[in-house]
Amino acid sequence: MIILKDVDTIPNINTLEGYLQAGGYRALRHGMEKLDPETITEYVKDSGLRGRGGAGFPTGLKWSFVPKDTGKPIYLCCNADESEPGTFKDREIILKKPHILLEGIAIASYALDCHHCFIYIRGEFAHEAEILRKAIREAEEQHFLGKNILGSDFHLNVVVYRGAGAYICGEETGLIESIEGKRGYPRIKPPFPASVGVNQCPTVVNNVETLAFLPFIVLEGPDAYKRFGSENNYGTKLYCLSGHLNTPGVYELEMGVYLDELIEKYGGGIPGNRKLKAVIPGGSSVPVLKADEVHVRMDFDSLQKAGTMLGSAGVIVMDDTTSMVDAALNLAKFYAHESCGQCTPCREGTGWLVKLLKKIKDGRGDKNDPDLAVDICNNMEGNTICPLADAAAAPIRSIVQKFRDEFDQRLG
Amino acid sequence: MPTLTINDNEITVEPGTTILQAAQQLGIFIPHYCYHPGLKQVGSCRMCLVEEERSVKLIPSCAYPVTEGMVVRTETEKVVKARKAVMEFFLVNHPLDCPVCDKAGECELQNYAYEYGQQHSRMTVAKVRFPKKDLGKHVLIWPERCILCSRCVRFCQEISGTSELFVLSRGDKSEISVMPGKRVDNRLSGNVIQLCPVGALISKDFLYKSRVWYLKKVTGICPACSRGCNVTYEHRNGIIYRTLARLNPHVNDYWICDDGRYEFRAPEKEKRVHAPLLRRESHLREVLLEDAYTAAKMKIKSILEQHGPEQIGGIGSPCCSNEDNYLLRRFLTMIGSKDVAMLPPVDRNDREEFPGGFVISSEKAPNKQGAAAMLGVPEDPEHFRDMLSRIEQGRYQALFLLRDFLDLPLEDELLAALRKVPFLFSLESVRSELLQAAYCILPCAVFFEKEGTMTNDRGRVQHFNQVLLPSTLDIQSPWSHLAKLMKHFDEKIDFFNPADVFRDIARDIPGYRDIEYGALRKDGFHLEKR
């Protein structure tokens, strides 16, 4: 374990004192005293660290897009807007070990020559925001953050910015708009945030979990990180298990653990000896897997091969008592509620899907309706500014296609 | 400068040009809603998606700057399918109430639905309903018809800078709304109606007045202030139903103010002067036009013989065209008088400059600069004051007065002075107190019944067309009356139309040399700084 190491053995690891006791902030000192910013960036590149927000974009590569010579400030945004249904790993990090995130932020900022970081945290995480604020105060007092970090001339101002409850603000450009005080409408790309982000300045947006890996990579080196996982999918991963399981929760495991093992061994199997029906492996926005498809490694590439995605690794397990029509409708309602309404296909498509699935659920559907639902998904997908339409289309289409018989049974 | 190909046509464009603009340069049309050339792009309607070789996904051509070597296709199977899908999505919650919608006939939703849509609906569930709302003095909204292109929101942010409008709620519950406690009452509010591509924002002024396809369009210049915004008048049966902004990048871009859009209508028929009037035995009587000219000629001749040309003067108008004012001076010069002045300009002290660069000028007379140049007088109202005191002193036997309904009402002082003039020749369009003072009144066309040129406050000479026909043949433009009167003095003089008059302006007036009348029709002509 990397991120959640020592959380069970050092009870006060959520405080600065406990974190220091566990060897905290050694990586920052090591990085600032022994390594230069370029080397840290190289470390991150070499480690093969891929972003943990869902897309799995290589973190080092993302950093390398930031122009250093614009004369403008460079901003770091830590994306703690964790709103993906079935996902609760970032909250776990903040609750259990907030300083590992702050250390990661300090390292990233040092590497990026950034002096201002926003932690954009979802509005519902009021308690977690308070934890972070307290941790930032602690760290500033000890010069791990704030002015003259570790006695150097490096300054870093970290600000906790609370969202107001919109899923779309977890999309990185929606997040930037929200930080600027605007409505969370995702921006059209290009330009990418790396060149035009917060206040028109170069900006890096990284997920909480991504940043929390940095202390380990800097202290132990990229090769140590690569000892976990497999080619192109290195490191560990925080898996969120939820749904019909005996022991749901967050488990940090080596990348590439088998999904069926995850369900049986860590999730404790399905209660009441009921049978597995379906799993959404990567937070609600990815295609569903049927019970016979779950012997698959939980990493970016294996899941892609299996026709789905690792996403945020929010594993949602559904047993045989679940109505897949209801599940599809439930998902559709979420996306219709959260669509920002900017792009036509998403705005109209998500709302239409809800009504259509409701019609099927209520037994009023006709025989063309399941096909129409699939067609709406196809028409939404890929034609919008941000991936919310894709995120709505992928799971719903796969549910309709893979559990078509359930839909057909409900038709009027 | 990047070079790209669009549908196999190669083109090199300025850096920063978007694909949609490059396509426009090639004459390739890409359908779009949220894109408006006067506003920032948001790329959200997804109607303008095109295929580019290097891109996996379709890209929004309105918001995508061209890069070297792009290979763009605008009509592939993938593009056509996506467009069809977007059209279907637009109509999912649209009420399809075209038969009662004012926008029908000029609605982009209608046009594109025919052009790019599928001809049947797959929508079998209840639509999202919204009540219609009153947004401001001139603006109503039917949110159900709205496609959320956000042009109106961006207009209020970027051009008027007043930010009254915003998008309320999310997803398919989104609707255009006004900020709490606000109304769309800025002085440019009518523009949001004109730039709405569908029938969502509707003008109270035009509500259920006419189907748009019955209206005839005529290009003109707005007479509301000295800025001279370019407009299109839409009329039918002698009534102007709408005034729309017309693009002129040198003057008004795509916009006009509400004064120009709503406040200026031709005066009612009852208020007009319809026939020539001549004073006989202390009463004004209707006469034939020829008789009025002949009487005027006789009277002038006798004054010239008895008193000399010094006792004949003329007053031009900053609200009349260059041609009207020029011929007034030409006529006076012909009979030997150099005594001209210009009615005082109309400063209302309400200048406003908007963040988007649009200016409402405080000077309301539309042709102050041009009229002064034509008459050869200073723009300073002091010059007119001098003439007024001469009138009061009884210096004039005869005076020619040019007026449009746009001019200020006659002040008591001026009226009292004019009563002292034994033979006042008034070229008038509306009935006024002058009827008591005038010797002869020639019925004149009002602004909307004229063709000609005007010069705006920044020295741009612009052409405007005749919109409405006068109700009688006697009602003519002042230049036309003056030309005919001059013909009574000199057979050789022959001005047939405003272009003939302008040819002489281009010969005689400094600064106007060599301007071609025909070349003024598009964007006008900017005079050299004097």
Image (cartoon, coloured by chain):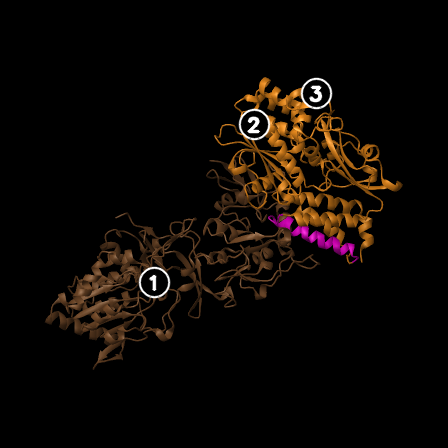
Chain colours: A orange, B brown
**Residue B288 found in image quarter:** bottom left
- Residue found farthest to the right: A273
Q: Amino acid at mark 2?
A: Leu
> Is residue A343 magenta-colored?
yes
- What residue is rendered at 58% in x and 18% in y? A33
- The numbered dot on residue A224 is 3
Rounded to the nearest angstrom, the CA distance separating label 2 from label 3 is 23 Å
Report the span colored magenta.
A340-363
Give the residue type that dot 1 points to: Glu
Please name the residue shown 62% across and 19% down the image: A30
Question: Which chain does tag 2 point to?
Answer: A
Q: Position of residue B39 (x, y in %)?
A: 48, 48
The location of residue B400, given as percent across then percent down, is 22, 68
- Label 3 Cα crowd, 10 Å radius (few <14 / some 14-19 / many 20+): some
Furthest-left residue in view? B306
The reply to whether discs 1 and 3 touch (Cβ–Cβ < 8 Å) is no
Q: Secondary structure at mark 1?
A: loop
Q: Tag 3, which chain?
A: A
Report whether A369 appears left or right of A139. Answer: right
Q: Is residue A316 left or right of residue B137?
A: right
Q: Is residue B123 left or right of residue B489?
A: right
Secondary element under disc 3, as helix, strand or loop, is helix
Question: Residue B451, which numbered label?
Answer: 1
Look at mark 2 in the image and give the residue it sits on.
Answer: A112
The answer to if B105 sits in the magenta stretch is no
Q: Compared to B248, does A226 lie above or below? A: above
Q: State whether residue B114 is above or below residue B288.
A: above
Residue A225 vs residue B40, the one in the foreground: A225
The quadrant the C terminus of chain A occupies is: bottom right
